[in-house]
Amino acid sequence: MKILIVEDEKKTGEYLTKGLTEAGFVVDLADNGLNGYHLAMTSDYDLLILDIMLPDVNGWDIVRMLRAAGKGMPILLLTALGTIEHRVKGLELALTTIW
């Protein structure tokens, strides 16, 4: 299984990458939204783990652009924004999980 992680916090990205790699997954890590979007568009991933609060292109916009381009991979959204409104917004964007 090939996983893309888009996370700008270095420690969090490294922690997720290490754990998933040790579990046998193939993992690519992007540290900003533009790089993450580029990787998602140019490779086939089985899962996208995506932070919302990125410094250049936010996670919501990345989801919109990927879905508009026909990319339907499952998306696990990482966020500190745990309000009902954010969960509803995620469901409206056809996200798999908000965590």
Image (cartoon, rainbow, N blue to C red):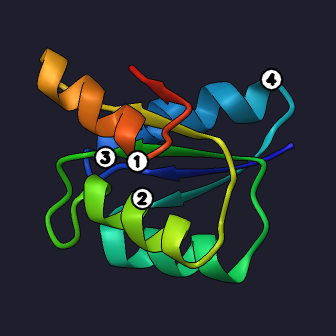
First reached walking from the N terminus: tag 4 or tag 1: 4
Q: With respect to residue 4, does 77 lie above or below?
A: above
Mark 1 and 2 residues: CB-CB less than 8 Å, in contact?
yes
Q: Percent x, y for residue 45?
A: 75, 57
Task: Using residue 86 as the reference point, say whether residue 65 is left or right of it.
Answer: right
Please name the residue that numbered disc 1 is placed on: 93
Looking at this view, is 71 or 53 the one in front? 71
Mark 2 and 3 residues: CB-CB less than 8 Å, in contact?
no
First reached walking from the N terminus: tag 1 or tag 3: 3
Judge the density around disc 3: few (<14), some (14-19), many (≥20) Cα neighbours within 10 Å. Answer: few
Marks 4 and 3 sit apart, C-alpha to C-alpha, by 20 Å
Q: Percent x, y for residue 47?
A: 68, 44
Judge the density around disc 1: few (<14), some (14-19), many (≥20) Cα neighbours within 10 Å. Answer: some
Q: Percent x, y for residue 67?
A: 53, 65
Please name the residue that numbered disc 2 is placed on: 63
What SS does tag 4 mark?
Answer: loop
**Circle 4 or circle 2, nearest the eye:** 2
Marks 1 and 3 sit apart, C-alpha to C-alpha, by 26 Å
Please name the residue that numbered disc 3 is placed on: 10
